[in-house]
Image: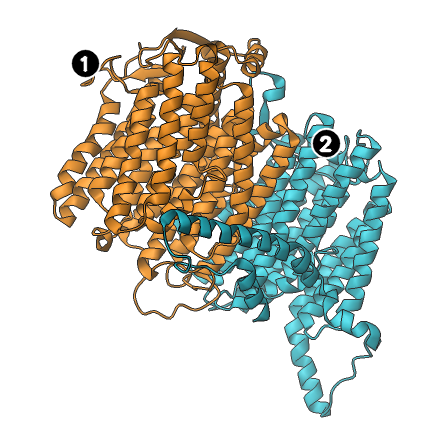
């Protein structure tokens, strides 16, 4: 078993948890400092875990020293090539959100609950076992539900959808783990899990909770619940390795329909939050679509789009949130003309918006290119609909930019320019988006390794589509990427994990 | 150092000069350092001059060596090796200097340099001076990239940069709704033109098994390249390329974005919509001329679209009430003729026509404010209106004045039904959510999108 040099995963998970306990009863300024430190430490630990994994040249590694060795099945946390960049991405999303939260918003945006949510999300991304994932995904639903209750907003749509998600997920995992239905257990379990994933991912027509959450919860909480893409992560861990081909096809069709539908819906929204929700839904569906393509190209594209959507849409959402914290809820039916009052936010809005639609020079460009190529390999129609989706999203982003930042002269006398802490968030995001766009190959190569490993894992379970891919790869795989199967210590079912030497 | 190496280095400088200019403006934006007007102008001049001299060196080198095709290979920007050859992907960066790209890259540098010098004075102390020059740099990079592109991906990068900078420059005077609405219209047309272009590449991939640029542009140096597709495939893919070119060059039925684009500052109108970006579609058609040669129905469609656009532009230009719109439609008439020439299978004539027309139209557009001033002085001196030589007959005047209501038709038959469908979906979703939340039907009611669209249309 490969081991990280330090207990980095547990630091990434437990420091925010400790921060949540400390921040809960602290006065606002102290709570803010604690939150910044805890989320910053989580970013540092998760980035270090990624580098450590690269240094080990292993596909998967556990913490060298663990506090959780006493649990049944041993240490539940592991980092592999799939989750290695997702952990820092999620930690960064939280860190930037906390950094860009103004002091005036501390009463509405609970930093303690945010840190708790961060701890749960990082634990989810570091867990591979089915039951562990199920428990953590269930726990992840709690913070937004608590906030909706505190705000006195209706929780019904959210709770109904998330309840259905958890029931189906539990049923699916139980069916598979206990072989409850004999020979068909695997397939029926995969179907139930796939349905659960569709609900959690907000796939049409089970998506209504998604814009509703943005409308009722605080913008920060909604962003943090949706941008780490827990639904596609569950698909990656629970659906892709075991589901029959036809289930993946159905998921892909549903994801494609959602991408097109949400792109169209984003064009008719009047409220900026709902617009953002549909744009994110459309982009997140592209990730889900790519995951089901079961080709190296498609999967690599999906994993790259995942990173670009995570960064770009978080930046986009945070920019909208910054604007909203200055002028209130943004009405897209009228021109707000904020460009001259907040030029930095205007520039970042455009940059992140363009990155989200895969504009050249940004992190999303090559990612989307790969996804389209992968889709075309599967079926040209998918590629064409993908292009239509990005065209619609492009129009929607530009429309929103014009409505929010131009078309009028802002008459207010209050200084709307970004604060230093917000400026740091802006700079970090811009550098990552542009840096990833100008030098995409390291990210692409890392995602390609992960995609090949996933396909090998699927092939090892006898799925014919993946076997074709794997067979084709036998002659081309290079020595240092040749996969080797070892027993999985973290999984609670008789599966095999993959280690690259 | 061999002559080939020297040509490659010079070719690289042609591309790097505008790229460095864009990076300089990006850095200044990220560090929140605003350069002085003098610094911005000097940086732009230096970039244009470097690019122009390097392009000149390549041109002279090509003449001296008799080379018709200088390729600058920059390798793979990103690649996926895949588990099989079919599962591989390479983002290949390649630039090509040939008989088509060299004149156009020269034209680009000369016109951008000239108009940059003009804009330096025209926009002096304008609040958006730096924004203008930043977008201007982006446009220059896009034009150079698209013109010299040796792969589909490179062409698309340039194509997109031109689109974004154009839309934002149309909306340059962004504290008024008019320019902003027009900027959005231009962006929308560009986005769908881009989608059509990419769908053409996807279709090529499906038909041919690979989205190789050479299959679109033909194997061999321009204009002697030969495409190897079947006639039917060439027709289908060529029609998609024609839609992309129509969107970019404002051919029918997308023509109305051209006068809308004149909302931008005069220098950008001159160099973008009068000279360079309006010819980008015709450049694409010239580049894929081997494809046109494979299918006579495709060539016929290009000729028909070109002639129809030329006739439309010529008629409408005569009834426009403002000088920039009149020039825009006059420009469109010429672009239509160039398109028809390409459809007839000509190569050098449309190329010369593009260069001549772009240069002449830039001069006209830059002179337009002075001409208005001269007319006013003349009329003041005469004490009466100067006769304009007559316009079209009354029967066609209405059509010409209203520009055939092309935008109105597109809005009515494409945009409005689209928004209506999603407006209904929005209303149904809101109702469903209200029911789920147990709220009364009156709470948080939102008007449907078509209502708003009608209000905005009425306004």
Question: Is residue B52 in view?
Answer: no
- In whole angstroms, how far apart are the C-alphas of marks 2 and 1? 62 Å
Q: Is residue B243 above or below residue B397?
A: above
At 73% across and 39% down in the image, what residue appears? B98
- Considering every residue shown, the one lying at the far bottom of the view is B383
Do the residues indicated by labels 2 and 1 lie within the same chain of the protein?
Answer: no
Examine the image and state in which quarter residue A221 appears.
Answer: top left
At 60% across and 40% down in the image, what residue appears? A387
Q: Which corner quadrant holds the C terminus of chain B?
A: bottom right
At 53% across and 13% down in the image, what residue appears? A463
Picture coordinates of residue B3, whole percent (x, y): 66, 32
Lateral position of residue A451 relative to residue A128, left or right: right
Dot 1: element: loop
Picture coordinates of residue B147, whole percent (x, y): 67, 44
Picture coordinates of residue A77, whole percent (x, y): 28, 20
Which chain is represented by orange in the image?
A: A
Q: Is residue A98 above or below residue B399?
A: above
Lateral position of residue A360 relative to residue B283, left or right: left
Q: Which residue is mark 1?
A: A70
Q: Which residue is mark 2?
A: B214
Q: Chain of mark 1?
A: A
Closer to the observer: label 2 or label 1?
1
Q: Which corner quadrant holds the N terminus of chain B?
A: top right
């Amino acid at each position: 078993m490969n081991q990280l040099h330090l207990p980095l995963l547990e630091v990434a998970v437990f420091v925010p948890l400790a921060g949540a306990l400390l921040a809960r009863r602290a006065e606002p300024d102290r709570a803010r400092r604690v939150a910044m430190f805890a989320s910053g430490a989580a970013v540092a630990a998760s980035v270090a875990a990624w580098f450590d994994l690269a240094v080990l040249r292993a596909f998967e590694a556990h913490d060298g020293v663990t506090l959780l060795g006493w649990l049944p099945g041993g240490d539940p946390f592991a980092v592999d090539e799939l989750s290695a960049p997702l952990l820092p991405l999620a930690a960064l999303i939280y860190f930037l959100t906390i950094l860009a939260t103004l002091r005036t918003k501390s009463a509405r945006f609970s930093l303690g609950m945010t840190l708790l949510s961060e701890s749960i999300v990082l634990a989810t991304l570091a867990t591979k076992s089915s039951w562990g994932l199920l428990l953590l995904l269930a726990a992840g639903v709690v913070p937004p539900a608590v906030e909706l209750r505190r705000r006195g907003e209706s929780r019904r749509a959210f709770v109904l959808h998330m309840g259905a998600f958890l029931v189906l997920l539990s049923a699916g995992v139980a069916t598979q783990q206990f072989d409850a239905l004999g020979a068909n257990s695997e397939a029926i379990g995969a179907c139930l899990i796939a349905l659960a994933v569709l609900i959690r991912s907000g796939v049409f027509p089970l998506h209504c909770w998604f814009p509703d959450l943005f409308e009722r919860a605080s913008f920060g909480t909604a962003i943090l619940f949706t941008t780490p893409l827990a639904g596609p992560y569950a698909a990656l861990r629970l659906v892709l390795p075991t589901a029959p081909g036809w289930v993946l096809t159905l998921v892909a069709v549903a994801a494609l329909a959602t991408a097109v539908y949400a792109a169209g819906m984003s064009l008719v929204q009047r409220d900026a939050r709902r617009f953002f929700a549909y744009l994110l839904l459309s982009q997140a569906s592209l990730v889900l679509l790519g995951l089901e393509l079961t080709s190296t190209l498609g999967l690599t594209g999906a994993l790259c789009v995942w990173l670009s959507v995570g960064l770009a849409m978080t930046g986009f959402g945070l920019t909208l949130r910054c604007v909203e914290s200055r002028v209130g809820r943004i009405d897209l039916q009228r021109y707000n003309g904020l460009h001259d009052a907040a030029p930095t936010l205007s520039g970042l809005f455009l940059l992140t918006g363009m990155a989200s639609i895969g504009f050249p020079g940004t992190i999303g460009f090559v990612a989307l290119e790969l996804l389209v190529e992968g889709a075309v390999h599967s079926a040209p129609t998918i590629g064409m609909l993908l292009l239509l989706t990005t065209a619609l999203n492009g129009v929607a982003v530009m429309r929103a930019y014009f409505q929010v930042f131009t078309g009028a002269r802002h008459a207010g006398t209050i200084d709307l320019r970004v604060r230093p802490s917000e400026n740091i968030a802006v700079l970090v995001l811009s550098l990552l988006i542009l840096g990833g766009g100008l030098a995409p190959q390291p990210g692409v190569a890392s995602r390609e390794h992960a995609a090949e490993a996933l396909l090998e894992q699927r092939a090892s379970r006898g799925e014919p589509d993946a076997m074709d891919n794997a067979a084709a790869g036998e002659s081309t795989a290079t020595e240092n990427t040749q996969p080797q199967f070892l027993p999985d210590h973290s999984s609670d079912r008789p599966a095999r994990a993959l280690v690259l030497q | 150092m061999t002559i080939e190496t020297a040509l490659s280095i010079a070719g690289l400088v042609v591309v790097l000069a505008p790229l460095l200019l864009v990076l300089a403006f990006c850095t200044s934006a990220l560090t929140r350092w605003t350069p002085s007007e003098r610094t911005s102008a000097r940086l732009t001049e230096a970039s244009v001059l470097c690019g122009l001299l390097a392009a000149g060196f390549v041109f002279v080198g090509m003449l001296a060596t008799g080379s018709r095709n200088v390729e600058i290979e920059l390798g793979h920007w990103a690649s996926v090796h895949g588990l099989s050859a079919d599962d591989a992907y390479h983002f290949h960066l390649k630039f090509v200097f040939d008989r088509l790209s060299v004149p156009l890259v020269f034209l680009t540098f000369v016109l951008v340099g000239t108009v940059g010098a003009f804009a330096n004075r025209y926009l002096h102390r304008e609040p958006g001076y730096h924004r203008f020059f930043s977008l201007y740099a982006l446009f220059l990079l896009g034009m150079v990239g698209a013109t010299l592109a040796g792969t589909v991906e490179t062409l698309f990068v340039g194509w997109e940069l031109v689109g974004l900078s154009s839309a934002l420059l149309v909306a340059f005077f962004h504290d008024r709704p008019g320019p902003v609405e027009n900027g959005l219209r231009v962006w929308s047309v560009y986005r769908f033109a881009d989608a059509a272009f990419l769908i053409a590449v996807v279709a090529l991939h499906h038909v041919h098994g690979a989205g190789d640029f050479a299959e679109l542009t033909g194997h061999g140096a321009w204009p002697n390249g030969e495409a190897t597709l079947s006639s039917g495939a060439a027709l289908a893919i060529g029609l998609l390329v024609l839609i992309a070119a129509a969107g970019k060059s404002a051919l029918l039925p997308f023509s109305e974005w051209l006068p809308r684009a004149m909302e931008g500052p005069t220098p950008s109108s001159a160099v973008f919509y009068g000279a360079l970006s309006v010819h980008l579609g015709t450049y694409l058609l010239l580049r894929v001329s081997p494809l046109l040669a494979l299918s006579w129905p495709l060539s016929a469609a290009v000729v028909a679209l070109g002639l129809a656009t030329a006739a439309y532009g010529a008629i409408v230009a005569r009834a426009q009430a403002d000088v920039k719109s009149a020039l825009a439609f006059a420009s469109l008439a010429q672009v239509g003729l160039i398109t028809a020439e390409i459809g007839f299978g000509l190569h050098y004539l449309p190329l010369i026509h593009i260069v001549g027309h772009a240069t002449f139209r830039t001069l006209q557009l830059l002179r337009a404010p002075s001409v208005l001033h001269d007319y006013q002085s003349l009329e003041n001196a005469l004490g009466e209106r100067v006769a304009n030589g007559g316009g079209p007959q009354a029967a066609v005047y209405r059509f010409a004045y209203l520009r055939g209501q092309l935008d109105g038709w597109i809005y009515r038959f494409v945009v409005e039904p689209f928004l209506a469908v999603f407006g209904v979906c929005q209303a149904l979703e809101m109702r469903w959510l209200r029911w789920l939340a147990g709220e009364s039907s009156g709470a948080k009611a939102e008007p449907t999108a078509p209502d708003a669209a009608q209000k905005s249309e009425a306004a």
